[in-house]
Image (cartoon, rainbow, N blue to C red):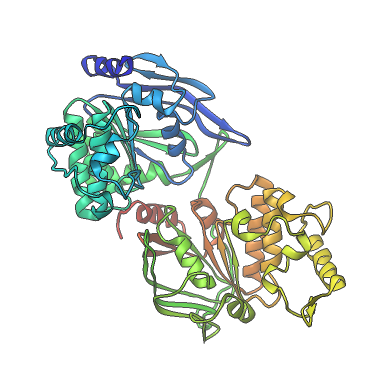
Amino acid sequence: MAGTSAAATALDQDGPLVSLKNVTKRFPGIVANDRISIDFWPGEVHVLLGENGAGKSTLVSMLTGFQQPSEGEIEVAGVPQDLSSPQRALDLGIGAVYQHSMLAPTLTLAENVSLGRPWWQKPDRRGIADEMRKTANSVGITIRPEALTSALSLGERQQAEIVRALMRGSRFLILDEATAMLTPKDAEKLGNLMRLIAQDGRGVVFITHKLNEAVAYGDRISVLRLGKKVGGLPPEQLRAMDKTEAHDEIVRLMFGTRTTGSEATENTPPPQHKLDETEKPILEILALEVDDEATPVSGIELKIRPGEVVGIAGIDGNGQVQLAEALAGQRPVRNGRIYLDGVSIEDKSIGGRRNLGLSYVTDDRLGEGIVGAFPVSLNLLLKQIGDAPFWKHGLEQPAEIARNATEKVAAFDIRTPGIGTPAGKLSGGNIQKLLLARELGEKTRAVIFAKPTYGLDLQNIAASRNRIREAADARKAVLLISTELDELLELSDRIAVMSQGRIVGIVDNNETARQRVGELMSGVGE
């Protein structure tokens, strides 16, 4: 195929396999990638680093043909190419392996590889199996084509996906968070496999949040922040550094002084909440364990005092959702205790916890936070259906429901044509205001915020953060889960970092917090 020959030519040339030339990608209201220029060379493992929202996923989407640049060019073997579809990217020798396996669990490995081949031809199962073994042997691994995919470990599935990509002629392989779900031993195997693939003259892009892996397996490192490439370590500089020096430089690039426009901004001063360390905690979590197939949570220990904001930092998918839902009563607790004002609540229902003063502001505004077809007035009472004074003897009390809605719409500045408007017709910012109005009542003692500003515009971000401050000022206990480090630094008194379902460190919010939290998020210095 023409694409395969183009990729093969790249192996013989002196220039990069793939180049990004001032690539920009815009979405409504946001610039996800801003004039990014990066060269990816044959024979190298090129590591891409960046915290949540840095633009890595959008970059991968453009390289694999799922998105197209708004501006700039992508060159393959020195030739500008229009990666108009995933198939076009595959034809040009660009393959990808993702964090979550894309293999069908009910099929064998050989059957998975046969998917996508001409439908009118009977699959040559024996030939495919032989080809799989040959390809696997060429990069030093053993594979069982006849094995049922569901019976394999995550590491074995990752290896099989890499073999499938190589069988498709991939000369440029993107591994997007491919080690995130692996055991340390399997992650090490995958790292060694990347090295072997690169040594064969291919190019490997490795996206990770773990600095130890980046330094151990990378030949070159590029760092993205807020949609821009802010720096990196070329091979000669990386080789000249010891591990500590490399870690320090990468953390500085990823989490250092922020820029707004052309002006540098210093670290945000920590909040000045008046805390009494002798006060009993409002919310206390002891040795909490939560079952989950993807990310089980274990060993969570936290105490939150009146007026305190404790932030939860970490890369998405490290157990934050499981923790929030377990605290709110939406997910069962396997072990451990949760106390609210000294009362054990881990066995209580959602309603029982709410009656005691625990509120939860979900990050899933549309799917979980509201019933889109219900009016604003009823959505403000979703967690109080049947309760007096809004219901009596099972009958709605329209005047009370309207009074409550009118007061809260005014108090929280919910922009709506009327309290009878279906909540699903509101903007994202106004839906968030509705959730805040519902959850921040006078009887609330502790409130859990899950990514409260995700997807909001600047005005609504500011409004939501002000509500969090007001909750702390009103002496409520606040647990703030966010993937935005700046937000946590602006609002939190202490910041706990979660990784793989555990808290790996708790940092007091002071002048060194950004550096320390960044190190913990990146797997350094636990």
Give the image quarter of residue 306.
bottom right
Of all residues, the one furthest to the right in this rendering is 399
x and y percentages locating residue 483 in the rendered image: 49, 53
Q: Residue at x 33, y 50 (%)?
A: 180
Q: Is residue 240 visible?
A: no
x and y percentages locating residue 273 in the rendered image: 59, 68
**The C terminus, quarter of image:** bottom left
x and y percentages locating residue 421 in the rendered image: 80, 54
Q: Choose between 18 and 90: the one closer to the eye.
A: 90
Q: Choose between 522 and 343: the one closer to the eye.
A: 343
Q: Choose between 463 and 324: the one closer to the eye.
A: 324
Give the image quarter of residue 95.
top left
Q: Is residue 129 above or below residue 425?
A: above
Q: Residue at x 13, y 43 (%)?
A: 142
Q: Residue at x 67, y 62 (%)?
A: 436
Give the image quarter of residue 414.
bottom right
**The N terminus, quarter of image:** top left
x and y percentages locating residue 353 in the rendered image: 58, 78
Q: Is residue 53 above or below residue 491?
A: above
Q: Residue at x 55, y 56 (%)?
A: 451
In the picture provided, is 366 more to the left or to the right than 332? Answer: right
In the picture provided, is 8 more to the left or to the right than 415? Answer: left
Q: Is residue 119 above or below residue 415?
A: above
In the picture provided, is 398 more to the left or to the right than 291? Answer: right
